[in-house]
Amino acid sequence: MSDRVRLGMIGGGQGAFIGAVHRAAARLDDNYHLIAGALSSTPEKSIASAKELGLAADRSYPTWQAMLKAELARPAAERIEAVSIVTPNHAHFEPAKAFAEAGIAVILDKPMVHSVEQATQLQQVVRERDVVFAVTYNYSGYPLVKQAREMVRAGELGEIRKVVVEYNQGWLATKLEESGQKQADWRTDPARSGVGGCIGDIGSHCENLASYITGLEIDSLCADLTTFVPGRKLDDDANVLLRFKPAKGGVAAKGILFASQICVGGENDLRIRVWGTKGAIAWRQEDPNALLVHRPGAPDQVYRRGNDYLASTAKGAARLPSGHPEAFFEAFATVYTNAAKAIRAGAGAKGPDQFDFPGVDDGARGVRFIHRTVESSTSSQKWLAF
Ligand SMILES: NC(=O)c1ccc[n+]([C@@H]2O[C@H](COP(=O)([O-])OP(=O)(O)OC[C@H]3O[C@@H](n4cnc5c(N)ncnc54)[C@H](O)[C@@H]3O)[C@@H](O)[C@H]2O)c1
């Protein structure tokens, strides 16, 4: 794509984690040009961060409000066409809504917003303004996750009966937030993280991965959230039973979703297993170039990234020949690249469906999932309709 999308960024300044991953993902396939930023929570740090990245002084903004105003005052051919929002969760809704209302495409990290009401508002704005809106559920970008999705869609696993999806981390097994560690600090604070701790931070990835691969819709859920670390204000461990809506004329699948940040030794141990009547698949984020496939009465098979036998979507999401490992950056870049294609095609609100990336509806479902698990966990009724 010679005509690179003019990109602005909110968040991702000095000391931030995921902003740098977004910048690398945006550049990997050369589809974007980062030209503006309001990169941090204070004006001084925003300007200093922009200087480090080599942004022009007149497009290094103290706040996102200043960026929006100044960019809209520029001729349309110069102003940013898309904005990446990589701030902590409490600072997602307002900029996402304001930029989408201004007709600027939004690429926003998960969980999308704090409340179901905010999520509904964003869905409305995206439809009314017909803008491209991506939510970086980056695990959907892995080639073998796309392969698993294609196999389910093609009926290769038969009717889906059971889904087990898990994400085990150990980095919050102690009260890390007391040390001032930036990422732990806001993630354990309800005012900035939202109603969910671990369930919002990584349980939401599980929900999205299961939905993306299986296409199943949750019918009801029963959640047990725990705060193991004394004095912490949000959950750090989540165990959720899922009942899915029956597939057309078929069985109602069951699911188990668990996510934890107190699993000592766990790094980013995200896994999914799906069992159907004709076969099963298993995928692990820490070994992402392989997909294990079981079929009854046959030896197990390992599908590997970069091979001709894969589905076209899986082949299209790979950049290197088989055997050269690809992983987190590349999967993130696939979300960015597909969003860029949607922007260039003028796909607007239909972008996610036409170009295969998570959109505002996926983001809204994720927010609802977090709220329903928290409600179920605190309710005596336990099983709640989704
Ligand atoms: N998709 C993924 O795999 C993934 C991984 C990590 C984080 N995330 C999400 O990305 C977001 C950021 O997480 P992080 O770990 O990078 O956080 P972080 O604390 O490392 O970085 C957040 C950045 O946002 C800036 N910021 C805060 N308020 C701002 C404001 N009003 N205007 C401009 N900048 C502001 C901070 O100064 C900081 O630079 C969160 O929503 C998180 O859930 C997603």
Image (cartoon, helix red, strand yellow):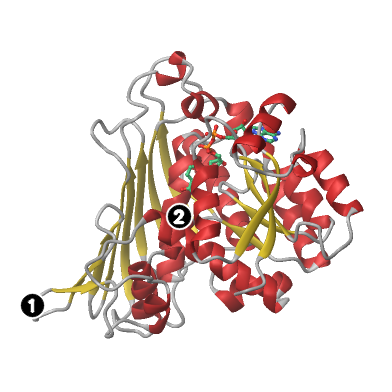
Picture coordinates of residue 340, whole percent (x, y): 62, 68
Classify residue 229 by image quadrant. top left
Secondary structure found at label 2: helix
Say whether marks 1 and 2 touch (CB < 8 Å).
no
Q: Relative to 75, does residue 240 appear above or below in the rendering? A: above
Q: Relative to 181, does residue 244 appear above or below in the rendering? A: below
- Disc 1 crowd, CA 10 A, few/some/many (<14, 14-19, 20+): few
Distance from label 1 to label 2 (Cα)? 30 Å
Tell me which residue sits at (75%, 66%) in the image.
131
Tell me which residue sits at (27%, 64%) in the image.
289
The first of marks 1 and 2 along the sequence is 2
Circle 1: residue type? Pro
Picture coordinates of residue 129, whole percent (x, y): 82, 65
Tell me which residue sits at (77%, 38%) in the image.
61
Please state, as top left, top right, bottom left or bottom right, where the N terminus lies in the image.
bottom right
Q: Relative to 323, does residue 256 appear above or below in the rendering? A: above
Q: Nearer the viewer, residue 103 or 217?
A: 103
Secondary structure found at label 1: loop
Q: Is residue 251 visible?
A: no
Please state, as top left, top right, bottom left or bottom right, where the C terminus lies in the image.
bottom right
Picture coordinates of residue 265, whole percent (x, y): 23, 33
Picture coordinates of residue 58, whole percent (x, y): 80, 42
Q: Quadrant of ligand 1?
A: top right
Residue 299 marker: 1
Circle 2: residue type? Glu
Return the residue at label 2: 207
- Disc 2 crowd, CA 10 A, few/some/many (<14, 14-19, 20+): many
Q: Is residue 2 visible?
A: yes
Q: Nearer the viewer, residue 151 or 37?
A: 37
